[in-house]
Image (tube, grey):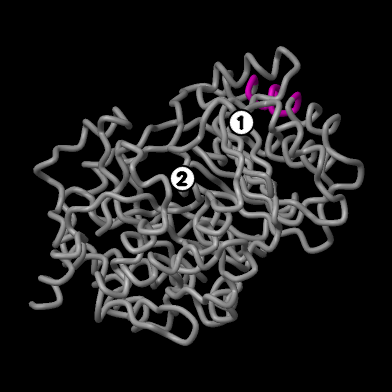
Amino acid sequence: MKHLEDLRRMGLFDARVPRYTSYPPATAFTAQAGAEFQVSCLGSLDPATPVSVYIHIPFCERLCWFCACRTQGTTTLKPVVNYLRVLKKELELLRATLPEGVTMGQMHWGGGTPTILPPDMIRELAQAIMDVIPPAPDLSFSVEIDPTLVDDAKIGALADMGMTRASIGIQDFALDVQEAIGRKQSFTATRACVDSLRAAGITSLNADLVYGLPHQTPAKLANTIAKVRALDPDRIALFGYAHVPTFSKRQKMIPDAALPGEEERYHLARQAAQSFTGSGYEAIGIDHFGKPEDSLTIAARSGRLRRNFQGYTDDTCPTLIGIGASSISQFAQGYVQNASATAAYIERIEAGHLSGHRGYALTSEDRLRSAAINMLMCDFEIDLAKLDVHPNARDLLPIHKAILEEFAGYVVASGQGLRITKAGRPLTRIIAQRYDGFSDIVAQYSQAS
């Protein structure tokens, strides 16, 4: 009981804070770092260092009400065909901008629903990307998959083009929960998708779950977890539902009264975490779990875990090139986001220009704060010796001291730095925000619990 009182006092059940998939968060992006900055960053890449590539497919046959991603519904392939045509134009603009010899170490297709593409379009898009940015010998290629919108032919096409990891959206298997979020998906269809992926030789499988959904209860979540364990994924992402109806209008379809309270959310998250770790998965960061032999687990164990816009990653590529509407690129110099609305993105590409429309140019102070936040989010500790590679690292000492005092017992001094205890890990995002130089920006972030 005292533990819950402490967490409440420290803000866990009230705070809304960034997820810190980047620093600064995208809320700090401005139009000052747009297409011109994008071209400069792309042109300065070192061909000897592979890059990661993210492709955004913003279309869905159904719009799930809980989702806050940049997506749009369609009942025909007509807008998808046109979008693929524009993606190929963007790739040609990249070809003219990138230094010769740049290769691709990782590729991720997200959405929206990438598996809305039929097999021929899957092959066409993958080949177009690889023609412009050739794959490195050990390319990792992951795709977000909707089990209700995929078949053997699509999975075969993805496997033929080199897919190595599939990420399956599940959220929750309880029917009333699915109805409340506009996403019906049976266990039978999900099982068939997993079997097809395994038969196609896909050896790495990720399952996405969400806690804090409407009508979700411990009993329903336990049933979902049992079914997920039967699917035997290699890693699991357990995200807290972010209810932001003022930002994502479709979330107004979800009645507030059906959502679990903040403390209920906390207990649901703990229940799931204990179930997964109790069945052999290792906890990774604040919301992932992996089998001991999974590459993400190994990265976490060896201190190589990182955060990017897809969440936790073992990606070692320092550059991420975002392609498609609303995609965000990450460079050594900073971030650039393509035009968010699909129509605006298409207009810019059709005019013969890259579509970067806002971003952020990093300062030395930003890099220091980013390193500190990444250490906390990935390793639950800050090593001052590692921070000393950044100029003025000791400027953060007053923050370290204040954190040790404010979160006493949940953050402890450790070697040359500080460490969040296991009991304090639910507070990680709140603690990370103490290092955020943009915490005064008014924005609607997700719940900390």
Q: Is residue 193 among the parts visible in the rendering?
A: no
Report which residue position mark 2 lands on.
Answer: 25
> Which of the 4 quarters of the picture holds residue 401?
bottom left
Amino acid found under the numbered disc labelled 1: Ala
* Span of residues in magenta: 82-89
Residue under the point 14% across and 61% down: 264
Classed neighbour count for the residue bearing mark 1: other residues with Cα under 10 Å, few (<14), some (14–19), many (≥20): some
Residue under the point 44% across and 53% down: 20
Task: Please state, as top left, top right, bottom left or bottom right, where the N terminus lies in the image.
Answer: bottom left
Q: Earlier in the sequence, mark 1 or mark 2?
A: 2
Q: Nearer the viewer, residue 243 or 190?
A: 243
Q: Position of residue 13 (x, y in %)?
A: 17, 58
Residue under the point 62% across and 68% down: 203
187 to the left or right of 254: right
Q: Position of residue 309 (x, y in %)?
A: 53, 49
Amino acid found under the numbered disc labelled 2: Pro
Report which residue position mark 1 lands on.
Answer: 33
Circle 2 sits in a helix, a strand or a loop, which is it? Answer: loop
Task: Please state, as top left, top right, bottom left or bottom right, where the C terminus lies in the image.
Answer: bottom left
Asked if 158 appears above or below 203 in the picture, the reply is: above
Q: Nearer the viewer, residue 438 or 111?
A: 438
> Which of the 4 quarters of the picture holds residue 5?
bottom left
